[in-house]
Image (cartoon, helix red, strand yellow):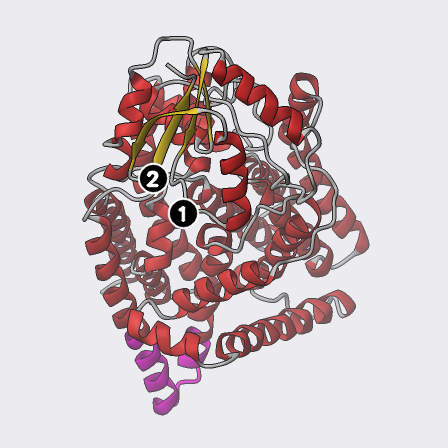
Amino acid sequence: MTSRQSLLASFLILSLLAVLGTFFVLYATPQGLSLSDDSIAYIAGARSILSGNGYHAIWLASNKPVTHFPPGFSSLLALLGLSGLDPLRGTRFINSLLFGANTLLLGIIGWRMTRSQSAGVLLALLFVANASMFRVHTAAMSEPLYIFFSLAAFITFYQYFVLSDPSIGNGVRSEVWLILTAILTALAYLTRYAGLALLATFVIALVLLQDTWRKRLTSAGIFIAGFIPLVLAWAIRNKLAANNTTNRKLVYHPLTEENIKTGLYNFAEFLSPVETWLRVIIRIDNLVVIILFTIAFILLVWAAFNGLKKFFQPAAETPEILSFTSTLYIFGYLASIVSSMLLFDASTKFKLRINAPMYVSLLTMLVFFLHWLWGKRAVYWRSLSAMIAVFILAVSAYGMSASVTQLRKGGQGYASFVWFDSEAMAFLRELPQGTRIYSNQPGPVYLYTDRPSYVLPDLVDPVTALPREGYEKGVAALKQDVLSGEAVLVLFKFGSESEDVQSIYTQLADGLYLAHDTHGDMIYTAFP
């Protein structure tokens, strides 16, 4: 086979894997993607854009401009909605295509990173067969789009360094790729605010890897200048429309033990999608912590050695760009989300979707390691590399099969029949138009009744973890509104929440008439 034929064959294989990834998502979600509160916020935001009212929180009665969620995903849903496809259905179409596109981009990254077409195919296979990555793409969330922009930015950044070599390209051509990287990074930020980690990754890489301070400052300046316009436009819009930039306040709140345990469990699930193995791993004290810190230590030492060597010895060989920036990004992203949890948003947890971008980079570095092992050429090293790859692929395929089977059984989250067949929702749909609805689940109320609702008074702000002011006044006002006959109080899953939350529900319902009670879903009205 000639080199051109080999190139074509590899590209066709990657394209087939991309198509396969798209098919997997469509096949596993016949009733639509998994839905959460954030999913409904993105969908409602897209509908608001389509209606010509701008990016507003139409699932809430306040209908304020949205600043908490960046506009990237909702804007893409709205763009697709111009064809007549409702954003609720559009999420399934977009995320299925993104699973395929991300598979293809990762294959290209593996190919470029190792200069091995086989390694590129392996990385694409590992991604498309990974149950954690698959589940991220079967939820109506912004992570798949964020991963797409991130991977595209890694590729353009790599291309910038390739063309920066005088023997290959020229300064003007390379700077175009650097500006394109900046724009993709800005788009990632406008999809998830965690995109700031991507900005930091590329700036640090430019400072460490360029030969002279002139190049370091010039390239970093060009990159930041390309990043700023879109981000600044969004910040100005938010300040003018809502008098805040991202709806986040600087307040310290420590990481909770529960949050850390959630993160460790999700990492263990990423390592082992086989349920029986996962239970064993979790039961062994500190095993997941040891594995996590071992991987982190090895990657940190590798990145620090290569980066600092190039920084202090500019004549030294430049480390491979894609693997180096992927490793930097793992630590940059982790620092970004931990900082957010500590200082800006206590409601952010180490859930799968939050961890997913780091998992993508870990898969990339796994293939980089396997290729390095294969490059030793000794039979036993190549055999070890092949056995590790085959073992991981086999385990991944098993986990993927289990995930597809489970997802096909029914809708996940708010897409479940428990919600769309809810008798409480049917009751709400029959209420007179204009009836105000107070609910602990405003998202699904909007989704299944097409009515906005009011959030309940709460003792603690979930974002700042600080006590809310005016709780008693809020409770009194809610009860007065319900007793006037112009509003209702809807409490889903009454009795199944924590003791603190349940005590609030009890206070809110006290003195109101229970007009509907099915499966723990209670609706309170004025007395008949």
Which percent across, then down, holds residue 70? 55, 32
Which percent across, then down, holds residue 466? 70, 42
Q: Is residue 376 part of the magenta span, yes or no?
A: yes
User: Magenta residues?
Assistant: 371-391
Q: Work out whether residue 162 can be spotted.
A: yes
Q: Is residue 389 part of the magenta span, yes or no?
A: yes
For the residues labelled 1 and 2, say whether their Cβ atoms are less than 8 Å apart: yes
The earlier-in-sequence mark between 1 and 2 is 1
Which percent across, then down, holds residue 303? 63, 69
Badge 2 density bin: few <14, some 14–19, many ≥20, Cα 10 Å? some
Q: Quadrant of residue 439?
A: top left
Report which residue position mark 2 lands on.
520
Q: Quadrant of residue 385?
A: bottom left
Which mark, by number, is residue 496?
Answer: 1
Q: Quadrant of residue 345?
A: top right
Q: Residue at x 53, y 21 (%)?
A: 479
